[in-house]
Amino acid sequence: MTVTFAVVIAVATVGVSTLAWGTVGILRLLAESRIASPWGAPSMFYRSDEVAVLIAAHNEELVIAEAVGAARRLVPPGNVFVVSDGSSDDTVGRARRAGATAVDLVPNRGKAGAIRAGLERFGIAARFPLLLLLDADSRPRPDYLRTALPLFTDDGVVAVAGRATTAADTPRTVVGRVLTAYRERTYVCTQYLHKFGQAARGADAVAIVPGFASLYRTDVLDRIDIDAPGLSIEDFNMTFEVHAKRLGRIAFHPGCAVAETQDPATLRDYTAQVRRWSLGFWQTVRRHGVRYGLFWTSVGVFAIETVVSSLVLAAALPVLLFAGLAAVAAAVLTGPAAQTAAALSAALPVGPLALAFLLVDALMTVFACALSRTRPRVWMLLFPLLRVWDALLCLRALMSAWGRPSDGRWRSPDRRPAAVAPAAGGADAVTSASVSAPRREFRRRTSATPSPGAIRASPLRAAARRGGRAR
């Protein structure tokens, strides 16, 4: 019984999906080590001036200028667009002063509605072959496009999932440091132990192209139901749409398309964000239902595992508390009560159970610290408590997903003031030293309603048919 409980807690802590996709990731790493990786070389298909950046923002005056500045260091100034979704602060004014083309959307429609409005208002799909969706609190690193664009050379790739990492300007409060360090561990473990394997060419099972900083080919956007009704967030649904309609592959590599994001610094904001993310996942699972294929099987296994793990983690602390009380009672009581407490303590020994609960979690922390090159801290022992809190939020979101539909409107977390990045301009501000002004009209490779096969066609083969050079 003791071994069974310990194994259940350990498996629930790390997850079966983590073991499976982590193994696939190792196999992918071994396979890619034998060939030259293309992601460090310049893209032969796309240039930085062919990328539009769209930022949907709501009351983000403290960080919007820095996000615009980071975007302008990647692309020409005329390629950066901001849709302020009914902001009551100076989001629009600061975005314009930072050099973006910005509009105010009234009444607000939520992030998905703002993205749809921005695509239509600025004619992005007709003018640019690629779109970078960027959150107002995100800052793409200077090599974001240099590493991301080559991933589109892979035949059939229609989206590149950005890799998230916590911004260096961590909060000064103890709670803020704990939360952001825990979030960074989540990023590292999820992206290295799940997404890297899921993005293997033979798998194509990436469950989310995160909306914080990711790239899409614009010729598939008109086939994606971006602002589907009843959802709290858009990125899970957009990813599921790519798989459901077989639009193409989703690429991801932890060394590519890296962007920093400002994570919540208070437990209130952290709770609201995790609850919203969890709710968006369950709503999307409910919307798309059960289907055939590796991706859908992976999602189904993950969903079941998430429920089971959440139940186990939610019960872990009460079980440990009960086992501890039984051990204390066995030591201080006498007679039949002591015998009963001793029997319970033997069935639920607090030591092995606590070790199973803490040891695997500690190994995850060591793994994340090794990859991110940070020193483990004593307060990281609090991370299991946050895992339990995540589990409770997940179960609550699961129940809410079958309740009243969401309207997608948002409330941004409290932001930390960010220094405005220097204005970008001229040839030095863009990745390429010689970029031309963005074309006002972009001729699509496919028809208005392309077939899945046409969408998956390789840009290299398309260039060969034209007899010209691929972008």
Image (cartoon, rainbow, N blue to C red):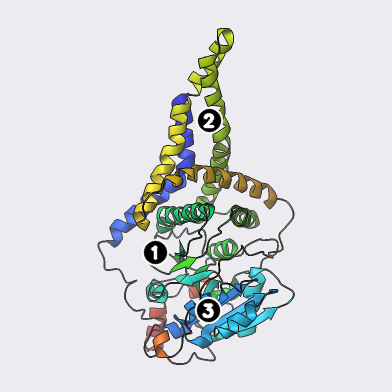
**What secondary structure is marked by label 2?**
helix
**What secondary structure is marked by label 1?**
loop
Q: Which residue position holds label 3?
A: 68
From the viewer's perspective, is residue 471 above or below residue 258? below
In the rendered structure, find residue 320 and report the number of the disc placed on it. Answer: 2
Q: Nearer the viewer, mark 1 or mark 3?
A: 3
In the rendered structure, find residue 253 and report the number of the disc placed on it. Answer: 1
The image position of residue 427, as x and y in percent, is: 40, 90
Circles 2 and 3, Cβ within 8 Å, touching? The answer is no
Can you tell which quarter of the image residue 459 is in? bottom left
Task: Calculate the distance from the C-alpha at mark 1 to the C-alpha at mark 3.
Answer: 24 Å
Task: Calculate the distance from the C-alpha at mark 2 to the C-alpha at mark 3.
Answer: 49 Å
Position of the C terminus, as image quadrant, is bottom left
Can you tell which quarter of the image residue 447 is in? bottom right
Is residue 268 rendered to the left or right of residue 424?
A: right
Number of disc labels: 3
